[in-house]
Image (spheres, rainbow, N blue to C red):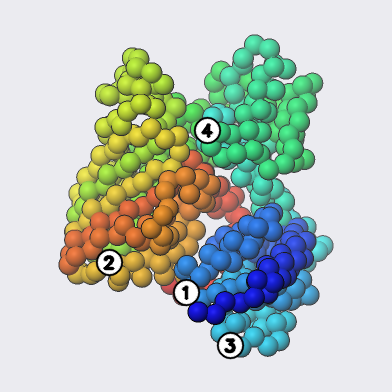
Amino acid sequence: MSQPPLDTVFQEWHDNQALAEQMIPLIGSLYRRHNVVTTLYGRSLFNRSVIRILKDHRFVRKVEGTELSVQDTFPLVQAMGQLNLGPAHVDVGKLGVAFKKQGRGDALAFMREELAEIVDGHDPSAGNGKPKDVVLYGFGRIGRILARVLIEKAGGGNLLRLRAIVVRGRGDIAKDLEKRASLLRRDSVHGPFNGTISVDTEARALIANGNLIQVIYADSPADVDYTAYDIDNAVVVDNTGIWRDEEGLGQHLACKGVAKALLTAPGKGDIKNIVFGINHGDIAAEDRILSAASCTTNAIVPALKAINDEFGVVHGHVETVHAYTNDQNLIDNYHKGDRRGRSAPLNMVLTETGAAKAVVKALPEFAGKLTGNAIRVPIPNVSMAILNLTLERETDANTLNDYLRRMSIDSTYQKQIDYVDSPEVVSSDFVGNRHAGIVDAKATIANGRNAVLYVWYDNEFGYSCQVIRILQHISNVHFRKLPRASE
């Protein structure tokens, strides 16, 4: 079997590195000057390293079965820089595959035709619109990840501006601010913060990548007047989980400067539980209190919706294998919940989950169809949902996987459903994944009308990205997505 010369392989790698290096400022310019976010099969190329860009190109082979390199996409990114584009999310990966299949040619003409609806759509004099103020009430695991994502997305037409975090007083303010900054700066699961963070003790603020974030100390929502900090018409994201009904969350709405409240936990009563990509269309202009449901609900609902649309679901059982959470004990101690008092790092803990019932709030057609249970396991992050389903229509594993693969790359669920087809992946491989859930194709079982689906999810980062998508939606931050999904 013949092999390419060693020097040729090495030179090709260096050539691709050089092109990726040239790509980075072009991608940055498109983002900052035109509000154009470039992606590669749903994976953002903005603010990424050379190696990450090259790895994302390799990912295309796994989902499309065809090779794609920066040699294919660089001319397209170059061409985009020559066009006067309006705001959009542009998947240069999909366009690169199409360009390659047609035999390449004139990249500028190709992109002018493919992006016709946003060409000459940028008006430099129009500005970026009025940013929406966001306040994080609570600064725990989800609060800090939300802060990271909001800071990362600041600028480029995102129009979401993290203005403040609200925490309880801890005595020495200077020391408390340093602690908050340190927790944002370093994370044992998600790694270091991508940027710089400084503390302004006098202003009681954190400055992260140029974003001034006010730290407000309060024991209850009633203690805060946001207008005193020049914050108005804000969305308060409640990460505490203390209040889950309209009465409790309504305390935020009573504060000056607050327009809406968004809960990062399942809401009770008549509060709409939103899984972005599935039922965000149910959000009405007059809705002032919303829930982003749970991480597990966000992980399973998109896959359940897709499968139900194509094959029909008669009934099923959801078993979640979930990373331990902060409410569990490090060592055995009292806990009001059954079994949760036992040491989280030392035990698998059988417990309940409301995810199966919560599915109905996003997908009413699943009423009475699902049961659920949960096992907490000794890892700090990334969980799995096992969907054991009885279908209306017969299928097999290959057919089911092929359908879900297509949903992950060319449907309106592209940001919610990811897909992996490797016999070697484990939970840590999905830390930082921005999708609601990731279908593990190698684990899929389907025989006739019976199917078992394994869905991984980063219960911290992936869920936080879903919360951000709701924030964008209720703040009227909408982008065209090109090329258009076929479904």
Choose mark 4 or mark 2, whichever is in front.
2
Which residue, given by chain and number where applicable, does mark 1 sit on? 65
Quarter occupied by the C terminus? bottom left
- Amino acid at circle 4: Arg
- Please report the residue visible at 19 percent of the width from the left and 69 percent of the height from the top: 394
Q: Secondary structure at mark 1?
A: loop
**140 sits to left or right of 411:** right
What is the residue that sits farthest to the top in this orientation? 171
Alpha carbon separation for disc pair 1 and 3: 16 Å
* Numbered circle sitting on residue 141: 4
Q: Earlier in the sequence, mark 3 or mark 4?
A: 3
Alpha carbon separation for disc pair 2 and 1: 18 Å
- Amino acid at circle 2: Ala
Q: Is residue 296 above or below residue 95?
A: above
**114 sits to left or right of 174:** left
Which residue, given by chain and number where applicable, does mark 2 sit on? 397
Quick one: label 1, few (<14), some, or many (20+) residues within 10 Å?
few
Quick one: label 4, few (<14), some, or many (20+) residues within 10 Å?
some
